[in-house]
Amino acid sequence: MANQILVLTVLAMTCTLVIAFEPSPLQDFCVADTTSSVPRVNGLPCLDSKLAQADHFFFGGLHLAGNTSNPLGVKITSVNVAQIPGLNTLGISLARIDYAPWGVTPPHTHPRATEILTVLEGRVAVGFVTSNPDNKLISKVLNKGDVFVFPVGLVHYQQNVGNGTAVSLSSLSSQNPGVITIANSVFGANPSISDDVLSKAFQVDKSIISNLQAKF
Ligand SMILES: *[C@@H]1O[C@H](CO)[C@@H](O)[C@H](O)[C@H]1NC(C)=O
Ligand SMILES: *[C@@H]1O[C@H](CO)[C@@H](O)[C@H](O)[C@H]1NC(C)=O
């Protein structure tokens, strides 16, 4: 009997399946302040819950088309914790994307969110690239009513591949998904990443790097 209990105890201790995920950070980084007495928060401090009102959980106007008169031909209207304070700590947000004909959302990633996109109007080509070493492009052309998922952190893009305007609505699994646009990060960093680093990284002449840096 004692042996059986011992065996069961050892089994219970060694056969526990752990399915875990790190808590999602809600800011790019958090330099520790070891002297502060302020409680640690991930996100924004909380309003006294007695003061909460409907407007803290509300955003109006997402039916309005964004102005796509810009070089990319795309306008993103974000609805995250910056627009709806009630989203703080809830791990969810929205974005409306308006596309001019052939407009492009350039390759970018959301460091803190998976995105699920629904096409409301038009025809939109989408894709994401898996991480190293495969770098496999997973892409598809979507029509009205089609839904596509961009897994957290992976580089992805969208393009209106129709002659009319297009509209999509994305849900994102963070109150503050963050956006890293690859070209802006790499060629538009301030101060600049050294052209020696970039010319080696991209295996091109430094003049091509300066040309690209000038555009961002
Ligand atoms: C759209 O944006 C362009 C460029 O900023 C501007 O010239 C134009 O007036 C805007 N259109 C509307 C309807 O706001
Ligand atoms: C866009 O318009 C061009 C020229 O009229 C036509 O050839 C093409 O098939 C159209 N493309 C789509 C996706 O409707």
Image (cartoon, grey):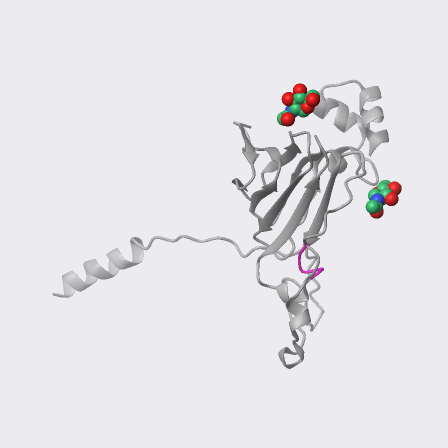
Q: Is residue 130 left or right of residue 84?
A: left
- Quadrant where the image shows the C terminus: top right
Principal secondary structure, stretch drawn in magenta: loop
**Residue 201: x %, y % from top left:** 70, 25
Rendering quarter of residue 54: bottom right
Q: Is residue 23 above or below residue 211?
A: below
Give the percent coordinates (x, y) of residue 84: 68, 63
Residue 177 seen by the camera: no
Tally of numbered tags: 0
Examine the structure image and report whether residue 81 is included in the region drawn in magenta. yes
Residue drawn at point x = 18 percent, y = 64 percent? 5
Q: Is residue 14 above or below residue 209?
A: below
Q: Please indicate, yes or no, whether residue 195 appears anywhere in the rendered image.
A: yes
Quarter of the figure that contains the N terminus: bottom left
For image coordinates 44% across by 53% down, the residue present is: 20
From the viewer's side, name the closer residue of 68 and 94.
Answer: 68
Image spot of residue 3 (x, y percent): 15, 61
Q: Quadrant of residue 24?
A: bottom right
In the image, residue 3 lies in the stretch drawn in magenta: no
- Please name whichever residue, 199 or 130, is drawn nearer the observer in this view of the structure: 130
Q: Please tell me which residue is depicted at 68% across the width and 70% down the height of the picture.
A: 55
Image quadrant where residue 91 sits: bottom right
Judge left or right: residue 162 versus residue 134. Answer: right
Closer-to-camera residue (43/70): 70
Q: Magenta segment, which residues?
A: 79-83
Answer above or below: position of 111 versus 136: below
Above or below — where is 172 with respect to 81? above
